[in-house]
Amino acid sequence: MPTYTLNELLEKMEPQARRDKALIGRCVDGLGLYTAQLAADNKNDPKIEKMKALAERILGYWGLEDAAGTEPSRSFLDTFYERVYDASTGGAVTSDVYQAAHNVIFGLYRYGEDMVVSQGKDAMSEILDMCDLMEDVAEKWDYESSIVADLNDHLKFEVWEMLNKIPLPGQAITDMKNKSYIIKQAILFDNDRGFALAHSPTAPSNYVTWQFTNDNGRHDYYWGKYMSSKERALINYINRVEDYVESYKVTEKPIPTAAAELASVVLPELSPSHIPVEVMSKSQPLVTVTFSEHERLRDIKEMPLYLANTVFFNADEQQQGDYIRLGKGFPTEFRIDFIMNGKPESYTGTYDIGSGDQTLTEHILDHAEYYREDEDHQRLLADKGEGVQTAENARFDFIIHELVPFFEKHCELSKLEADALSEAMGIHDKTAGGQPSEADAPRVTYLDSLVGYAWKCRKILNAAGLENLPELPAPFTEAVKSTPDRDAGEKPSVMDRIKAAQNAPKQPREPKPERGNKKQEPEL
């Protein structure tokens, strides 16, 4: 391996530095065109000032504040400001937007890549801002989305790598919620103030961080920061906690409510489980895709089982043609984390997307029934010994008669809860000030009771199984429609589309090729 003196190393780096600076110059020039078009459309667009600040920051970062731009008599910044001013006062905006998009996107990517190395975790939010801006530019100027997706995936991976190295402040939370949001992580300080990180599968902004006050176990949440990105929510939660500790010199103390809630779910150890324990505590089964050859499933970090059923079903349906043509699907490995008999458990398996036209729970049931009844597989087990065959068949019976009904009940509760929340949010959204009218109030109260029922049942189901679940609240009998009115042409909610997909009749398809013994045995 060659070695270099410092001067030799700097000399070898100089050409790359020149290329980087040239790219950054073209990037800022393209940002000037992008901002000018924003100004031409609306001179009061709040993005304009953000773009100006970004141009100054990028040029300062690369030492190009006073460097000559495409016109030697003016700097990059002078050209940027003049172009935006002309556009905001009615001047024409013309240029090769495709080349400008290329320069902006690759320049922002280079800037983000360098910040990973030079600034680390302090730059995580700005790196994500670069990703968002790259997507906006690509959409506005019709640039290849696949290229932008690849570049963004790399930068977001770097952000995730940095996040994974930062201990998440506070403690993981189970069975606590505020409005439609489930609390995932929280920290409480010795002054009875704290911060919480929460997620909602149905809210327009899925993630939120709150500050809260603890009053004898009762939490009042306020100053919420709402986001649609899990990465941004984690960063915001970490930053808010760190800033508060630095400002007020507080120390962490346990969260009494969280500890009490967890104790009410976890029971003393019962009989040995059929499934190896994975240490994780969640109130409903959560699905993680650990590997997939299907591009739309690769980025699923965590989602409730009832939603994963729809996602897997739709992906499988869409790939039926490829499976028939190629004779193979898209192998997808998954893990389901859940609590059963008071203990954290996990189930792992593989779904060959395109081969079955099933939900995830149907797929699990189908595999267990297949191996339980398949003569070839039973002979194989018998050859390994009577004890092996007995144990394996007991496992299949457990999946068929206990695990799948357990999963299906959870999905039923989650769907009930999501439907109730979706309808309640619709009622709130259509009323002035977000408060339901007097006529709608009884319906909202009933919907709240359904949400409370789902949460109560879920805790009992996790702790003791399907027995002794409470009765469903009495049906709502007022002369109120079961779903909020929607104006003609109004876009249906996410939950409406999920329900429509789940309830839609299956369309007949051409016969699929024989799978023979291609089924992959699920692992427990």
Image (cartoon, rainbow, N blue to C red):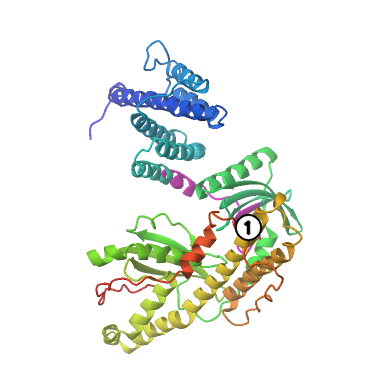
The foreground one among 11 and 199 is 199
Question: The magenta stretch spans which residues?
Answer: 158-187
Q: Is residue 179 visible?
A: no
Quadrant of the rendered image containing residue 75: top left
Q: Which residue: 23% across, 32% down?
A: 2
Q: Is residue 319 left or right of residue 44?
A: left
How many numbered badges does the structure rendering display?
1
**Residue type (three-letter) at the residue carrying disc 1:** Gly
The foreground one among 199 and 501 is 501
| Residue 159 magenta | yes
Q: Residues within 10 Å of mark 1 (few under 14, many from 20)?
A: some
Q: Which residue: 40% across, 71% down?
A: 506
Q: Is residue 224 visible?
A: yes
Quadrant of the rendered image containing residue 455: bottom right
Q: Is residue 266 left or right of residue 52?
A: right
- The correct choice, above or below, for 518 with respect to 134 in the image is below
Give the residue at mark 1: 426
State which quarter of the image contains the N terminus: top left
Percent of width and height locating residue 440:
72, 62
| Residue 505 magenta | no
Q: Is residue 472 left or right of residue 371?
A: right
Q: Is residue 294 left or right of residue 470?
A: left
Percent of width and height locating residue 251:
67, 47
- The correct choice, above or below, for 453 with respect to 1 in the image is below
Percent of width and height locating residue 47:
53, 32
State which quarter of the image contains the C terminus: bottom left
- The correct choice, above or below, for 522 with respect to 495 in the image is below
Q: Which residue: 73% across, 59% down?
A: 217
Percent of width and height locating residue 453:
65, 71
